[in-house]
C-alpha cells in the first residue's frame, strides 16, 4: 500500500463535512511536500487480546543495515524496532503513539478503519520525535499527552519543522497534542478502563498506560529491550527510584515501544524487564568514575539479565549503550556519584 492509498482509506472514515475535507487536504499536502525519502511500510500486527493490538515496524538484521543512509528515523527508532498500540472496543480506539512518520501512522489508521473503527483518540507517551512524527494522521481527533510534553513540543516546534532538532527528516507540520494532563487520569472505551499515568522515567514528560482489567502496562520508552536510552542523564537517579516504584504496581505483562517483536507477539514481558532496566542504570551510575568506564561493553552491563532471560542482545543497542556511557560520564565525571536506594 502506498501512502496516497492510505490517505484515501482514512478519508473514508471522515465525515463528509468541511472539517473532514480540510483534514484530507492537509494530509495530502503533508505527503506531497514531505522531505523524507519514501520507504516501504512493512508493519506487522500482533493481536495481544480481544481489545489490544500491537503494530510493529523495523528491527532489521545487522547484515542488511546501511548506516551511511541513516536518519533519526532509522538510528533512533527503526533499527531497534518500533511498536505502537491500539486499545479498541466497538467502533472506538485509543492509539498509543503515532510512529516516526505520517506514512506509518496512516497505515495504522487505515488498518483500524477497515476493522470498523470510526472514533479515534491519540495518546503520546512523550515528546521524542519517533513517538510524535505521525501525529498529523490524527489532526482531526483529540490528542492527549502530559502538559510537559505539550510545553516541550511547542518550544521545539520551529526546530522540529525545520529538521534541526534531531536532523532531517523534518516533521512538518508538527501536530501537537491538544489535551494535557499532569496527574493520573482514567479513560473508558466501553467497559475497558484505561489509566494514563505520568512518570519521570527516561524523559520527565513520560506518560504510560495501565490496563487494570488485564494488569497490562504499555510502557512507552520507560523500558526497553535491550537497554534504556539515557536521554536525560541529570535525572538518572530519579529514574532509578521511579523504576523501583513501578515494580510495585500490580502489573503482570509489559509491552514497551522498543522491544523484541517475538516477545511482544507472544504475551509481552514480565516485570523482570523493570529489574533489568534498574540494574542497568545502577551499573551505569556506580561505575561512572571508573578509569575504563567508556570501554565497558553492552555485555558487561546486561550479561546477567540476558542469562536470566529478562532481555536479549540486539545489535542496534551497542551504539545506544556507548552513547549512554558518554552521557553519564559527562554528567558525573567531576561530581559525587548519586546514592541509589537498595
Image: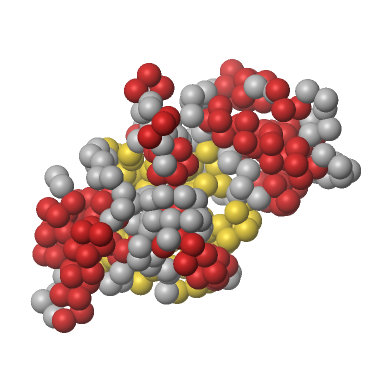
- Residue located at (52% from left, 23% from top): 313
- Residue in the foreground of this view, choosing between 174 and 286: 174
Q: Is residue 111 above or below residue 264?
A: below
- Residue in the foreground of this view, choosing between 190 and 123: 123
Q: Please give the count of numbered marks on the rendered protein.
A: 0
* Quarter residue 230 falls in: top right
* Quarter residue 138 falls in: bottom left
- Residue located at (61% from left, 47% from top): 231
- Residue located at (38% from left, 19% from top): 63
Q: Quadrant of the N terminus?
A: top left
> Could you tell whether 216 is left or right of 320 in the image?
left
Residue 52 in sight from this viewpoint: no
The location of residue 308, given as percent across then percent down, is 59, 21
* Quarter residue 333 falls in: top right
Furthest residue in direction right, as rendered? 336
> Could you tell whether 17 is left or right of 136 in the image?
left
The location of residue 168, given as percent across then percent down, is 41, 50
- Residue in the foreground of this view, choosing between 323 and 300: 323
Furthest residue in direction bottom, as rendered? 18
> Could you tell whether 285 is left or right of 315 in the image?
right
Q: Is residue 170 above or below residue 180?
A: above
The location of residue 215, given as percent across then percent down, is 48, 48
Residue 312 in sight from this viewpoint: yes
Amino acid at each position: 500500500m502506498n501512502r496516497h492509498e492510505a490517505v484515501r482509506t482514512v478519508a473514508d472514515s471522515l465525515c463528509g463535512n468541511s472539517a473532514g475535507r480540510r483534514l484530507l487536504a492537509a494530509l495530502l499536502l503533508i505527503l506531497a511536500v514531505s522531505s523524507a525519502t519514501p520507504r516501504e511500510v512493512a508493519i506487522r500486527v500482533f493481536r495481544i487480546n480481544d481489545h489490544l493490538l500491537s503494530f510493529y515496524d523495523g528491527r532489521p538484521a545487522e547484515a542488511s543495515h546501511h548506516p551511511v543512509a541513516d536518519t533519526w528515523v532509522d538510528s533512533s527508532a527503526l533499527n531497534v524496532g518500533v511498536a505502537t498500540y491500539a486499545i479498541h472496543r466497538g467502533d472506538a480506539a485509543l492509539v498509543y503513539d503515532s510512529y516516526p512518520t505520517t506514512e506509518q501512522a496512516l497505515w495504522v489508521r487505515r488498518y483500524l478503519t477497515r476493522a470498523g473503527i470510526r472514533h479515534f483518540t491519540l495518546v503520546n507517551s512523550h515528546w521524542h520525535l519517533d513517538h510524535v512524527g505521525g501525529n498529523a494522521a490524527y489532526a482531526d481527533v483529540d490528542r492527549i499527552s502530559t502538559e510537559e510534553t505539550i510545553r516541550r513540543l511547542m518550544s521545539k516546534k520551529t526546530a522540529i519543522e525545520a529538521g534541526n532538532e534531531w536532523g532531517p527528516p523534518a516533521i512538518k507540520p508538527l501536530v501537537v497534542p491538544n489535551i494535557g494532563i499532569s496527574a493520573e487520569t482514567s479513560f473508558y472505551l466501553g467497559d475497558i478502563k484505561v489509566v494514563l499515568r505520568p512518570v519521570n522515567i527516561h524523559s520527565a514528560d513520560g506518560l504510560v498506560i495501565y490496563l487494570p482489567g488485564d494488569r497490562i502496562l504499555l510502557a512507552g520508552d520507560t523500558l526497553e529491550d535491550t537497554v534504556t536510552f539515557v536521554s536525560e542523564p541529570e535525572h538518572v537517579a530519579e529514574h532509578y527510584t521511579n523504576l523501583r516504584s513501578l515494580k510495585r504496581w500490580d502489573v503482570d505483562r509489559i509491552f514497551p515501544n522498543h522491544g523484541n517483536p517475538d516477545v511482544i507477539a507472544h504475551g509481552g514481558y514480565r516485570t523482570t524487564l523493570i529489574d533489568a532496566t534498574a540494574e542497568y542504570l545502577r551499573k551505569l551510575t556506580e561505575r561512572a568514575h571508573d578509569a575504563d568506564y567508556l570501554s565497558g561493553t553492552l555485555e558487561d552491563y546486561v550479561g546477567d539479565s540476558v542469562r536470566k532471560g529478562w532481555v536479549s542482545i540486539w545489535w542496534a543497542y551497542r551504539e545506544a549503550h556507548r552513547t549512554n556511557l558518554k552521557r553519564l560520564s559527562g554528567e558525573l565525571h567531576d561530581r559525587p556519584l548519586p546514592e541509589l536506594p537498595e
